[in-house]
Amino acid sequence: MKLLAANSNRPLAQAIADYIGVPLMEASVRRFADQEVFVEIEENVRGEDVFVIQSTSFPANDHIMELLVCLDALRRASARRVTAVIPYFGYARQDRKPGPRTPISAKLVANLITSAGADRVLTMDLHAGQIQGFFDIPVDNLFARPVLVADIQQRFNVDNVTVVSPDVGGVVRARAIAKRIDADLAIVDKRRERAGTSEVMNIIGDVAGKDCIIVDDIVDSAGTLCNAAAALIENGASSVVAYIVHPVLSGPALDRITNSVLSGVYVTESIQLTEESRRNSKIKTVPIAPLIAEAIKRISEESSVSSLFDDQNQSFIKAIK
């Protein structure tokens, strides 16, 4: 097995390598003066099982291009199998046609990754699960749920917790976590007037006197998240925190979180936080490298990945201890 890290999230790649006990490959992923991407693999990969670790986060197009060039370089260097490890799949929200004459960009990116030379894809918490079907190669979609559940159980008294979905679309995700910590479930019913804005309409469920935990896969501009938190407090919640898998945090997100009623926002390392985000006292990270590293090991060993999530995450907790 060999691990190749591009430039989107080097700290996560190093943490994965440290867990597995395999050093990152010697490689150069750089730009020419005109910003063209150039990749040079500096060690032999002929016949090797290679994993390329690259989130397609901001700047998304640059990071996608780095991934594609890395895949092509490895294919031309005769790697036996190349797996694209994409902790955050950036185009996942463009999974359908929202109107006439619009693209399905997630499918386009899937085609590009396959054509560039990937033999399989390993990703985490796809915004839309059907994107797995956009690929004509195997796709393993990991869930951060075991890690989030373990962190919640460590930090909070779950006897007084209510898990909250910030919209109807996230109910399945929130219900899965609520079930594993034996907590109540609430739903924020909202109406989105236009893209990028949301208006909270109603809280479905009893949150009075509860410590509420909002669970979602992506926080982008944080408008929905902060509006939901405010609505929960208005309905009598004692406190509100959020657990988010992918911290996109674009535009006014940090200001909104700072000025919100949220006590904390816990995010994974799927996207490397900016320096400003790391300095924000409300934003805290939940390590996700052991989960991804364990999945990489199992793929390389041709053993079960799905068993990581059996028995209410106990198998995974034992695996990383």
Image (cartoon, helix red, strand yellow):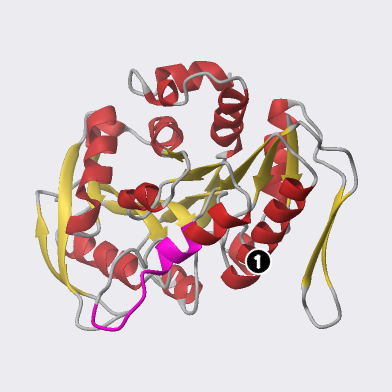
At label 1, the amino acid type is: Met
Q: Is residue 235 visible?
A: yes
| Residue 226 at x, y percent in the picture | 33, 68
| Residue 281 found in image quarter | bottom right
Magenta region includes residue 221: no
Residues 46 and 287: in front is 46
> Which residue is found at the position 44% from the left and 55% from the top?
265
Q: Is residue 274 visible?
A: no
Quadrant location of the N terminus in the rendered image: top right
Segment tinted magenta in the rendering: 99-110
| Residue 105 at x, y percent in the picture | 42, 69
> Which residue is found at the position 53% from the left and 43% from the top?
121
Instruction: State left or right for residue 316 relative to residue 80.
Output: left
| Above or below 304: residue 199 | below
Instruction: State left or right for residue 270 relative to residue 13.
Output: left
Instruction: State left or right for residue 210 relative to residue 278.
Output: left
Mark 1, residue position: 65
Mark 1 crowd level (few <14, some 14–19, many ≥20, 10 Å Cα): some
> Which residue is found at the position 80% from the left and 40% from the top?
24
| Residue 268 at x, y percent in the picture | 52, 48
| Residue 60 found in image quarter | bottom right
> Which residue is found at the position 42% from the left and 63% from the top?
106
Quadrant location of the C terminus in the rendered image: top right
Instruction: State left or right for residue 272 relative to residue 109.
Output: right
Label 1: state its secondary structure. Answer: helix
| Above or below 90: residue 41 | above
Magenta region includes residue 101: yes
Residues 80 and 131: in front is 80
